[in-house]
Amino acid sequence: MARQLIRFYTTQNPKPQAGILQDDGIIRFIAAFDQPDTETGETLVMDNVKLLTPLPAVPSKIIAVGLNYAKHIQEMKHQEVPDDPVLFLKAPSAIVACGAPIIGRPEWGQIDYEGEIAVVIGKPCKDCTEERALDYVLGYTLANDVTARTLQRQDKQWGRAKNFDTFCPVGPALLLNEGQDPALLALETFVDGQQVQQAMASDMRFSIPFLVSYISRIMTLNPGDVILTGTPEGVGPLRHGQVVRISSPLIGVLENPYQLVGETAHAG
């Protein structure tokens, strides 16, 4: 059975700790996040912890993939379907953990959620083949590629719109890559309990092995680097106070509230 790794702290011990999460909500402690086979014998109930991001370290880069689901291309009204993956970078400083607020400002205009499956790299990867690509994957988690849509359209590029602080929630757990087929990973997104997105990784135009190989031929992938594999159709704007829940049966639920701050944040 695939294992879920988490990083967390408690009110009694603010130092980051690591563990394996069981189906019954019990955490089995491990010596370190990068040592999943070193259980200490200590356990804790999940309800008593505060989650951190399930990443072994701050990534050197986050590589995001745009337009990787056919129906999302249609809803974004793109006239041409790209022949190759559309790549852009998100700043590691945008990362927040499950439970942390996504922060927006009125002057940024429309802020959209984008639920995604994320890939975490486990060892240096350069010019790897598609057939060997999964050998370099540590595991899989969930992400929200939050986007300032008004600014994206205004700028006609994605650098500013994708990179505000808090615009990359990641979590809640890391599903270890232990031989499972990533095409079978499922994704659902809910806003205030209403389902807005649903997809399988098999729906992607460019598969996870293809993306890892393709990106490794452009830049070296380092341990801890994150690849956001694209969002399916159903993206939309957030309003102050709404909660985004991105879920996958094998990974868990990534949940973050949206907070609009500023002088006119709560008008209307």
Image (cartoon, rainbow, N blue to C red):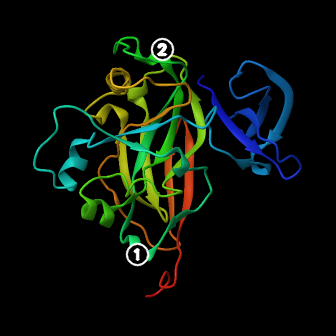
Direction from residue 172 to residue 221 in the image, left or right:
left
Quadrant of the image occupied by residue 185: top left
- How far apart marks 1 and 2 lie (CA) works out to 44 Å
- Quickly name the residue at label 1: 107
Relative height, residue 113 to residue 118 (above, below): below
**Which residue is nearer to you in this view: 26 or 263?**
263
The label nearer to you, 1 versus 2, is: 1
Q: Which of the two labelled residues, at mark 1 and mark 2, occupies the earlier sequence position?
A: 1
**Which residue is nearer to you in this view: 117 or 94?**
94
Residue extending furthest toward the bottom = 268
Secondary structure beneath dot 2 equals helix
Q: Quadrant of the C terminus?
A: bottom left
User: Residue 43 in the image: x percent, y percent?
Assistant: 84, 34
**Which residue is nearer to you in this view: 168 or 152?**
152
User: Residue 240 in the image: x percent, y percent?
Assistant: 49, 74
Residue at 55% across, 49% down: 93
- Quickly name the residue at label 2: 135
Q: Quadrant of the N terminus?
A: top right
Q: Amino acid at mark 2?
A: Asp
User: Residue 254 in the image: x percent, y percent?
Assistant: 55, 49
Quadrant of the image occupied by residue 38: top right
Whether residue 23 is visible here, answered yes or no, is no
Q: Amino acid at mark 1?
A: Glu
